[in-house]
Every structure is written in structure tokens, then in C-alpha cells.
Amino acid sequence: MENKMKIKYKIFKFLRLNFLFLWLSIVSLYIIQIGVMLTDPTYGTGDWGRSAWTNGIQFVINQTTSAGINVLVLMILMWLITLISNRIPVTIIVMAVLTAIVTVAEYQLINVRQEAITEASLQEVTAFGNLIGMLDIKLVIAFVVILIVMAVLLFIIYRRSKWIVFRSIRWRAVLMIISILALVPFFQINSDQNKETFIKLGDDPKVWDSLYDAVSNGGIVALLNSRTTDAMVQPKGYSQATMKKLVKKYQGEAKSINATRQNKNFKNQTVIYTLSESLTKPSYVPGLTISDNPLKKLNNIMNTTSSGHMVSSGYGGGTAGIEYSTLTGFNITAYKPTITMPYSQLTSSINEKSTVTGQFDKKIVVHPYVGSFYNRRAVYKNMGINYFYTTDSDTPVKYTASVGGGNHASDTSAYKNVLSKISSGNDSQFIQLLTMQNHTPWTFSGRDYNVIEPTDSNADLDTIESYLQGLHYTDNATQAFLDKLNKLKRPVTLVWYGDHWPGIFSFVNTSTDALSAHSTPYFIWQNDAAKKANGTVDVSESYADPSDFTAMVLKMNNMKVDPYWALKTELLEKVPTINNYKRDENGKLSFIDKNGKNIDEKSLTAEQQKLVKDFKLVQYDITAGKNYLLKTKFFQKVK
């Protein structure tokens, strides 16, 4: 009888504990969803309303199946914490702190980038110190206070032995194994063997839009949905034999293109790729009217050289993804939607041969900031970059002064660093510049450009006017940079582009105005010495894909191409621009014509579809396949 009573009590205790974890998990999920929905309560919520607090309840009640998956994950996590700590109060405190951190992180990331937390964004913990530096000081202070309070509470709890949950180490070990085994399938939620099961349980993956996914399925499940499985859908017919035929085909295309081009390579020349952080033209922003144009000189530059709209894959963020496309010639939207940060997720597949850097003798990157973000150091090593100059490199960048109360090195400083690195030797040189002046937060003190419309929105007009002031500084600095480059006897070609919009134009509907919200300016410019040495060709595209920039540079300078850049040239000349903000689970691409009209892959001509298929075969082989092409002469420096 006594043993039965003990067993009943243990069952009751177990059920009571699960009941507690159930309610704590529901509350935790509700708070996290507030962080997801707070920036825009109407995004993806249909007719729920305009209150994030009410919509959080709506999610828990209306989305019972997907909410249930989130709750189950949180409950298992609570069990793991309890089994490790052996103290219920510890579980409650740790979960409260984790919930607060996740909620704030979701809000901050969505507010700036319109992206929820994904596996790729978690890669940034390697640069934790610098991320903290970007947060509001009040948040940092609150975080430190919470950690101190948490440490004190944990000390008190562990002094009280009566709060011990399990006396038996054996039971703890058994339950630990069961909890871990129960959690494993959730970390493989989008694998081929588990995907259909979780869909039946209520998961409705929308991994092409992490924010929509988090709103629909919950922040926890959206994070799990974003986990990387296969990087890319294998194109039909992929085999070694297919790739051999493809090599032969584009060797012929390269021979045909090269017959009309006079220049072999960039020997004695410099090519500069400049990524202008968070820069777009105010005229690209629907509904924005300002007192004056801060980019008058940029407009003039674009009117006198090859230029147009670059279609960005990011909004408020995604810098390294756009950079990846410019250097490799590969397109992010050809990957599965879970691939959002190729530098971190596809590091081992990035190499010198299949990137623009493989065409040059010497190559450097200049970034007047720390070099720890986006796994760049490892990636640049794979690309054969000779030196990565940052504020924390062995030989740091020399010029770091800011302008007008700005928070980062000015564009003038960034350009001075580049000018000091331009070679005077006979080598071919590649320089990439990543600017920081217009990175968040915007703290420029001047207000020479005022917002006239909108006046009645929730937009932070003071921040927008500060951002416009930064554009003015960029405008002057860029013109001065070109003037100095033009005085050089060494031929120089410059690719200059804004990487993405800043996440400050909250009055713009990024769904209905998606093309505008992903449009930034670009231009490709030669100094007089380059025009004299190479001749010039207008390579303007109304809408340009950043993965085409290298093919455009080679064409402008009448440079011969290898088979890979021959394929990219064919795509540039015969296929509409790839739409970089549309993702498809099955690897289908979307395109944009010269008038900004969307075209799906099925609507392309037979010739265009064949070129797209060849491009996918190449990208798959290098990033997810067996690297057959690396053993051929498909990628080679033109000599």
C-alpha cells in the first residue's frame, strides 16, 4: 500500500510539473510572439487586428496546431534545464531570461531588417561584442542588470537544498536521454524524412520570408524551419557526363565572345567593387517627398556612365548575401529559402577559381570596421584574398574618422583607405571596399534635407532626416573619389552599388511595393586611363542582378572571358534580370524585365530556359554537388 501511495504521488508530481511547464511555455510563446508582431501587427495576421498584444493571443488560440509545436519544444527545453539544474526555480529564471532575450532580439532584428531570427542570423554570435555595440544603451544596461539579478537568485537557490527535484541520478540520466531524443526530430523539422509529419502536425513552412514564417508558425518553429538541409535542389540530368558537355559548350561560347574582344586581362589595371552600406535613392522610396535631393552628384554620375537599379535580395540587412553574389556570380534565390547567409552556410564551397578574384594577381578587401561579421575571414581566405584590412586586422586601416556626428568611419575615410592601396606595379589588382558610414544607427547631426511627406505616419522622421544627411556626405565623398581616380595614370574600373534599403521607411508596404523596396542604385565607371587602354561599352541595365556585375565589367572593358564568364555573359545578354527577392522551395527562379514586370521561369523562351538550367547546373556543382567543374578548365584566369 505504501509503495502504491509513493507511485501515485510521483505520478501526481510528474503531472503537476508538466502542467506548470505547459502554462509557462504558453506564456513564454505569447511573449515571444509579441516581439515578432510588435513592429507591424498586421503583417501576415490577416484580419486579427492592429494590436500585437491581442494578436499574440490570437496566435495561441487560432493557430493551435503550430502553437502546440512551439509549446512542446519549450516544454522539452524546460525539462532539459530542470534535469541539468535539478531546481525548478532555476528553470523558471533561465526560461524567463531566455524569453526576454529572444523577444528583444526578434523585435530588434525585425525592426531593422524585417527578418525574424533564423539559423543563419545566429551565426552572428561570433561577433557578439560588436552586436551589443549596435543596441540602444538602455537595452544593454537592462541586460546587464538582469544577468546580475539572475546570478544572485541562482546563488540563493543553490544554497537551498530543499528545492532539489530528483534524488536519483539514474532517473535524471534516463529522463535526460528521453528528453534529448524527443528534441532531435524538431531540429530536423525540414528534412525529407520529417517534413511531411510536421506539416500534418500543423507546421506550414514559409522559409522564403522568415518574418511571415514566425508570424504564421511561431518564432521557435520558424527558427527550426530555417535550419539548413540541402543547399539547392539538384537540377535534372546532373551528372559528370552532363557537366563535361557543358564545359565543351561554353568553351565554344568563350571562343566566340573572345573573337570580338581585344583585351586579355586586367594586367597593369585595378578593378574596385564598392558596396555602399544601406544606400538607396530617396526617389526610389514610394510616398517620400523631401525638401532637396541629397544625391545630386550621384545622379549626374549615373547619367554619364553605365548605371541603373540593382535588385537587392535584402531589406534592412543581408549585406553579405549581396556581396556573395557580386563576387561569385551565383544567385542566392537559386538556393533553397533556408540559405540566407552563404558566407556562413556555404563556406567550404567558396573558392578562388569560381569567383571574380580568380581573374586577378593581387586582391584585397578594405572594411573600416571589425572583420568578425559573416565569417568573412574564412571566406576571404578561400577566395585567395591577400589581405583583409579592418580596424582590428594585424595591419589596420589607416583612416577611420567619421563625419557630421556619424557613428562609423565616413565614406571619405573609406575611400582614402582604398586610394592608399591602389597598386603601382604591373600586376592586375582587385579591391573590394565595404563602407560603414550609413550603417545603423544614424546619428548625423545636420538636418539639411527635411521630410515633407509623409507627415502623419508612424515613421521616425528624425531618423530619416539623419539618414538623408548621411547620403549627402556619401554624395560629396563619392564624387571626390572619382575625381582622384580619374587623375591616376593606372587604368581603374569601379563597380559601385547600394546593398539594400535601410529599415526606416515604415510607411512603405514592402509587399505591394516589393520591387521599389529592393531597388538600390548602381553604376560601373572607368577612369580616363581605363577608357584609353580598353575602350568602353555601355552595359547599363534598367534592373541589374548583382551576380551579373563581373560579366558587365568584362564586357565594358572588352576583356576576354573563360567558359564560366562566357555563360554569365550569355545570361546577361539574353535572359531577363533575376528577381532577387523572390524565393521558391523547388528552386524555380523569377525574373524582371526592363520595365520592372515580373516573369516566371516557365514564361521564358526555350533558349532562355536552357541558359538558366546550365547556370543552375554550374551553381549546384560548385556549392552542393561533386565539384566536377573544378577538375576542368571551366574556371581559369584568362592570360
Image (cartoon, helix red, strand yellow):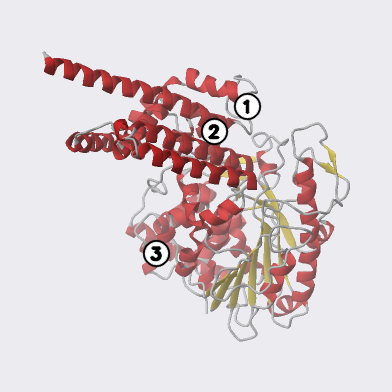
The spot of residue 259 in percent (x, y) is 58, 73
Marks 3 and 1, how far apart at CA: 47 Å
Marks 3 and 2, how far apart at CA: 37 Å
Earlier sequence position, callout 3 versus callout 2:
2
Does any portion of residue 195 appear in the rendered image? Answer: no
User: Which residue does the numbered mark 1 point to in the structure image?
Assistant: 42
Residue kind at label 1, given as amino acid type:
Thr
The spot of residue 620 in percent (x, y) is 42, 54
User: Which residue does the numbered mark 2 point to in the structure image?
Assistant: 212
Q: Which SS class for mark 3?
A: helix
Q: Nearer the viewer, mark 3 or mark 2?
A: 2
Neighbour class for label 3 at 10 Å: few (<14), some, many (≥20)? Answer: many
- Most foreground residue, 588 or 90: 90
**Labels 3 and 2 touching (C-beta < 8 A):** no
In the displayed structure image, the side of residue 623 where residue 447 appears, left or right: right
Which of the 4 quarters of the picture holds residue 365? bottom right
**In the image, is residue 30 above or below residue 523?**
above
User: Which residue does the numbered mark 3 point to in the structure image?
Assistant: 629
What residue appears at the point 42 percent right and 64 percent down from the top-left corner?
A: 247
In the displayed structure image, the side of residue 125 where residue 545 appears, left or right: right
Neighbour class for label 1 at 10 Å: few (<14), some, many (≥20)? Answer: some
